[in-house]
Structures are given as structure tokens and as C-alpha cells.
Amino acid sequence: MNSVVEINDLNMTYQSPNGEVHALDNISFSVTDGEFIAIVGPSGCGKSTLLSILSGLLPPTSGQVLLYGEPINGPSKKTGYMLQKDHLFEWRSILKNILLGVEIQKALTPEVEKRAIQFLQTYGLYEFRNKYPEQLSGGMRQRAALIRTLVTDPQILLLDEAFSALDYQTRLVVNEDIYKIIKKENKTAILVTHDIAEAISMADRVIVLSQRPGTVKQIYDIQLSCELRTPLHCREAPEFRYYFQKIWRELDIHV
Amino acid sequence: MYNPALASSPPKQQVKPISAAHKRYLQDLRRHRVLVRATQLMILVLIFALWEILARASIIDPFITSQPSRILRTITTLYQEGALFNHIGITCLETIIGFVLGTIIGVGCAILLWWSKFLSEVSEPYLVVLNSLPKIALGPIFIVWIGAGPTAIIVMTLAISLIVTILEVLSGFLGVDKEKVKLVQIFGGSKFQILTKVLLPASFPNIINALKVNVGLSWVGVIVGEFLVSRAGLGYLIVYGGQVFKLDLVMTSVVILAIAATIMYKGVVQFEQFVLSKTGLKQREEKNLI
């Protein structure tokens, strides 16, 4: 399989008046097409920095990041980014919200709008297309946010703690929801999270980062024996606990 | 693959028959509103009635306090002389020009200061000084530079309202969620798109707030300007009336001024309502409307 993302010896150092912060240290890994990767690590280990670099918002201090073999140079249409909160604009209807990305990229054509409406139909938001965000539940809003990203047709989705603003029950449902959509649309996904269970239940591989400066401590291939490969079912797999214990120890968190 | 049953179900609104208790609650609510309105109206009527009665009974001197019937007579006389709408028109026009210019230039400057961090850092101490300076002190300077006339009055108005507008709108821009800005950047948005897609709509409440403050300040600017230079307008009538001890004229002008200022303020509120009704902001903002 081809690797769609390749990271070689990535280093990131922030400059501030109080000194330098070494956020990422010699990160190297690659992601193959259609893979679901989760990155976990203690807070402040540079997980989000890594995603910002992948999204092209932040140039790395040194090292190489390749998307489909090409170096990153600013925000790319190949990547889509999901933030912690849905950040739907409250002054736009749901339809106008999900068209925001293509509107900004000046790619809004009747066909694109038709595709956007199809997304809404497929994922149960069609009847809410003219409603405003505050009229939707948290789970629906997160789904709308994902559709907003999907409408720009990215190949790789970057999820930055995309579920942490939701309450626990909603979160489990949204995990399931988003996972199925990503698999159905055949996207590669990189999820940053501090929730170990979320990472194991969703990802094919879990990358564990160390404390700052973040380095790749361990990479786990998640192999769960569950019939239906969906997050909710996988939480019941016998191997789930084993991975959880492993990663928990790896993180070495002391409060 | 996708199972809608797992997705959170849409919030359904049930139509329930109104219970007796709820009916009573709604009635009480309506009665309360009527009571407030009636009391407000009564206070107004009472003040004017008392004013008239005390003046007629010679308890207060209408030469100094004027009285409602004299105010009405003054309005009629002014109207018959054809001067009434002339004075009102001049003052309103100056105010509207000052208000519109103040808003446009103020928002423009705020955009400029947001656009260039360097510019905003450099201008900060100047803005602080200009904001704390009593702008009325600049009146004589404007008259000497620009000449006594409507232009000087409008410049006076701008001097009073501009800095406040800039600061209010800029603080609105800076208060917009950084993540919303990030979202636009992720989609490859330019700085101009950040401005039009996020900052302006998101800081709409601040802009409206600035407009509301601006309406009042524009009136202050115009009246002060007219005090200093003019030959016509409500401010002129007030000063002239004071000089020749025609308190009827002064009171009349003040009453007209109060009405005109209220109408303009309500105009801004209407504009706000109109824009809100076009967007999803409506529900959230309704409570704050006066």
C-alpha cells in the first residue's frame, strides 16, 4: 500500500519572549491510504502541534512532511481538519455552514452544492438544512462539522480532539457516527486524542507520544477480534483491555 | 453502514394543549406588561399636567419654567413661520451625516488596526490620549480651521463619536473566537475572507452597540457644534432662546430634540432587528433588545 503521509525527522521549536519550547523531537512515521491512525500522549506533548503542521498552518522547524509524496506548503485541499468544537457559524444556516469551505476555496458550483445536499440526505441532516446551529443537538452539530469538511473533498482527515467537547454518552454515539462516515467515504484519518479507549476503539494503529518534547514512544497495531469493526463493538473485544493497560503504562501519567 | 438509529434523534417539538396553570401564567404576564406600559404613560401625562396646572395657578413662573400649552403655541408659531421643519431638518441632517460618517470611518479604522498589528501597536497611545481628551475643547480649533458652518458641526460630531466607535468595533474583532478564524485559515482563507466571513458577522453585536452609543454621541456633537457656530437648527434655538430669555423656545427645542433622538435610536434598533431576522442570531439576541 502507498503511504499518503510521510513524516521524517520532524522537529518543532516554538519561540517566545520567555525562551524556546521544544515541542516535537525527531518524529517519524507514515500513514497508508485508508488507514485510521490515533495519536495519544500526555497533555502538552505536542499532539495538536503535529496536526497543525500536517494541516499546513504551521511550518516545522526542521524535517520533512510529505503528502502524497509532495512537501506541504500551506493549507492543502488534500487535508481536512476537524477542530475540538464544531464552530458552526451561528449566523449561517446548516446548508450555508457546510458550504463554508468550498465558498472560501471559491469552488462553489451547482454540482458541489448538489453533493453537499446529498451528504445532508445521507447523514440525516437534510430536514435541518435551513435551520441554524443552535437548533441542533451536539451530536448533529458535530456531524454537520464533519460534512463541512467532507464537502471540500479532502483525502486525509485530521481530527484534533474532535470529540472532547461532547459529554460522554454523546461522545460514544458520535465516535460511532463519525467512524462510519469516514469508512464509508473511504478517507484516511489521523485522530489526536487524550482518550485511550477512544483511540483503541477507532484506530488501526495507535501512536503513543512521550512527554514534551514529544517523541514517538511506541506504535501499536490494534487487532481486535470483533465481528463488526465499529468503535462501540470494539470496546467489548477481549483484547481491548490488554491494549488499554499497555498504552496506559506507556503514557506513564502521574498526577 | 450508516445507522441513523445510532445518531441522536432530532429534537421534536410536541404540541401540547395549554394547561390551566400555563394559561394563567400567560395572562399574568400580559397583565404585567400592560401595567408597566400604563404606568409609564401615566407618569408622562402626570408630569405635563402638573407642569401646566402649577404654571396656571402661578405657583411656578412660566416665564422661567415655560409650560406645555406655551410649548404647543411656540411649535405652532414656528410652524406658521415656516421655520419649524427648517430647524429640525438642519439638525437631523447634520446628525445623520455625522452618524453615518462616524460609523463608516470608525469601522474602517477598526479594520485597518486589526489588519496591521504594527499600526495598532503604534497608534495605541494616541488612541488612549484622544479617547480621554474632552473633544468639546477642540471646538474652537475646528471653527478657526474649517469656518463657522455645518462642516465644522459635522467634524465636531466625528471628533466625539469616532474614537469610541473604533475602540468598540476593534474590541469586537479581537473578541472573536480564535478557533473560528483558524477554521477559515484551514480552508485556505485569505485575510480578507477572515474579515468578511467571520469577523464582521461575528462582531455584529459589537457594531450595533457602537451604533447605539454613536447615535447619542452624534446628537451631543451636533448640539455642541450648533451652540458654538450655527445660525439655524435646534441647538441654535436653544442657545438663542437662552440668550433672549425665551424659555418657551428652549423647552420646545428640548422636547423636539428628545423625540428626534428617540426616533433615531429606534431606527438603529429596527435595523438591528432587520439584520437579525435575516440570520440565526435572532433568538439569542431577542432578550437584550430594548
Image: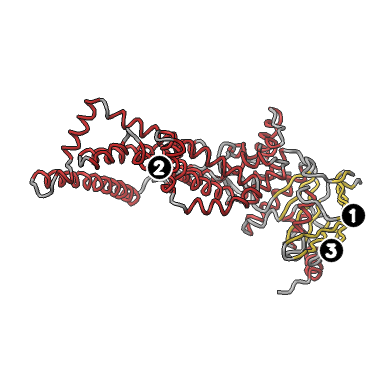
Q: Which residue is mark 1?
A: A8
Q: Of helix, strand and loop, which one carries label 2?
A: helix
- Residue B221's tag is 2
Residue B35 as seen in the image, left or right of residue B286: left
Q: Residue furthest front?
A: B144
Labels 1 and 2 share a subunit: no
Residue type at mark 2? Gly
What's the CA distance linking mark 2 and mark 3? Answer: 63 Å
Residue A224 can be seen in this image: no
**Which residue is rendered at x = 76% and y = 56% of the image?**
A49
Q: Chain of mark 1?
A: A
Q: Of helix, strand and loop, which one carries label 3?
A: loop
**Which residue is rendered at x = 41% and y = 47% of the image?**
B136
Q: Is residue B139 above or below residue B81?
A: below
Q: Which residue is nearer to you in this view: B278 or B24?
A: B278
Residue B212 location, quadrant? top left
Residue A54 can be seen in this image: yes
Q: Residue furthest bottom?
A: A254
Q: Label 2 near label 1: C-beta < 8 Å?
A: no
Q: Chain of mark 3?
A: A
Residue type at mark 3? Thr
Q: Position of residue A205 (x, y in %)?
A: 83, 56
Q: Which residue is mark 3?
A: A215
Q: Which residue is nearer to you in this view: B86 or A83?
A: B86
